[in-house]
Amino acid sequence: MSPAHPQSLRESLAAFADARIAVVFLLGIASGLPWVLIGSVLSAWLVDAGISRTTIGALGAIGGIYALNFLWAPLLDRLHVPGLRKLGRRRGWIVLMQFLLLGLTALMVTQDPNDDLFGLGMVLLGIALCGATMDIAIDAYRIDVIPRTEQGAISHGAAAASAGWWTGYSLCGALAFFVAGGTDWGWDQIYGLMALIWLPLMLVAMFAPEPPNHSVAAANPARNPLEWVVATYWPPFRDFFTRHGVKLGLGILLFLLTFKLGEAFLGRMSIVFYKQVGYTDTQIGAFSKTFGWVITIVFSVVASVFNARFGLVRGLIVAGIAMASTNLLFSVIAIVGPESWLFAVTVLLDNFTAAYSTVAFVAFVSFLTSHAFSATQYALMASIGNLGRTLLASPSGAIVDYMDGNWALFFLITSLMVVPSLLLLIWIAKALRAHLANDAAVAQLKL
């Protein structure tokens, strides 16, 4: 079918039987697990240890390493891992990072936030660094196996990656909270349990087929180290701005930075909010993790079908409006209190918008990525998005403290953060359609 025509519902659903999509889903699970280790489980541990909200929010900035992984992404486009060359460039890097993550996660068993917060932070920094590097290789793998012009496949791959990420994040997080609520295990022991999960994930990466190698970085010859650095780093960035122009390119990066900023502020403080408003670890595990995971899987598929049929831009606009609307439900919980039914409704709708926005966002970024520099360009754009989710959201705890714990007002503010990015998106879509007028794949944008 020509890319200019939308897929039917049957065609969209049939695409999920593609073996490539299944592999992308399984690799997505590995991408989600580090965020459990530096996110929700860490926040719960720090709250129980009596660490302040400001410190919790600031320590969460360690995840900002994800926003910087484009700095070393060109190395993954160019180099094989010594000793793992037979696995190929993409899988070699994935397996190496998972091996290091296994060791670092196990090392968390020896940490105590009240005894050595700096030491804990260094181990978490290592987890974030390896996780961010693993993500470069996994995202490049997905883009390499799905051609840019293949009808609907970009959205389905994005859905599989998102569903896998949330499976790793939600199910592993649920396991941690159920163990915490149902046993006398400490959070340090729970990290030991999390370390074991890396073993089957490593097997998945080792036996997945290596994708076609579209990269041109490794083919660039160099006579000296300076030429090697220039040949490795300059071409992917030059290609991005050459294809889009400087003005449009900067506009795209600004949109990626701001689109999920409100969701990031909410997400950083969600576990802190749940615990302080009165929900138990068992309720958090049941509603926020397990129940939320099921909803996320379902709506990831829905989002991919919508995007494949109606276009990437419309999907982003719907996702942005939905994010702004559902953030207000957290304000309602802050006013009403820890009602179980309200928690369930909020988690249902919040996970719908999180899944929808993630699929739409990943599909849009994948559309903009050149296969010739898939690791570097996707990492650059994803890193810009992660910058909003990590570093820019790090003052979230300080803002709540400044407002004397006025959670209702805090969540109202987060709901308004998406508005500027949606206005920017409309301009970007029109500019892209004009800039890519002769590209058959531009039909996927739709405005």
Image (spheres, grey):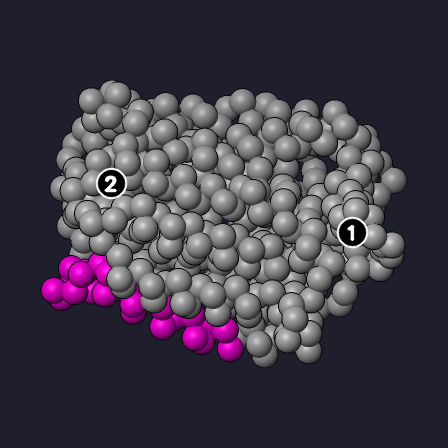
- What is the number of the mark on residue 272? 2
Determine whether the residue tagged by mark 2 lies in a helix, strand or loop. helix
The residue positioned farthest toward the front in the image shown: 224
Q: Please name the amino acid that badge 1 sits on.
A: Pro
Q: Main secondary structure of the magenta part?
A: helix
- Residue 222's quadrant in the figure? bottom right
Q: Position of residue 383 (x, y in %)?
A: 57, 42
Dot 1 falls on a residue whose secondary structure is helix
Looking at numbered disc 2 in the image, what kind of residue is underneath it?
Answer: Val
Residue at the (63%, 45%) spot, across then down: 71
State the image coordinates of residue 233 (x, y, percent, origin top left).
Answer: 74, 46
| 433, 284: nearer the viewer | 284
Q: Which mark is residue 337?
A: none
Vertical order, 58 against 210 (above or below): above
Residue found 54% across the figure and 22% down from its top: 420
Name the disc covering residue 225, or none.
1
* Towards the viewer: 421 or 102: 102
Left or right of residue 90: residue 359: left
Marks 2 and 1 close (CB-CB < 8 Å):
no
**Marks 2 and 1, how far apart in space?**
48 Å
Label 2: few (<14), some or many (≥20) within 10 Å?
some
Q: Quadrant of the image for the C terminus?
A: top right
Judge by depth and name the residue closer to the eye, 352 or 385: 385
Q: Residue at x 70, y 38 (%)?
A: 446
Q: Which residues make up the magenta segment? A: 175-203
Give how far across and how far down residue 176 sits, in percent.
26, 61
Q: Earlier in the sequence, mark 2 or mark 1?
A: 1
Report if residue 311 is visible in the image: yes
Residue 424 coordinates in the image, percent (x, y): 62, 25
Quarter placement of the N terminus = bottom right
| Residue 249, image quadrant | top right
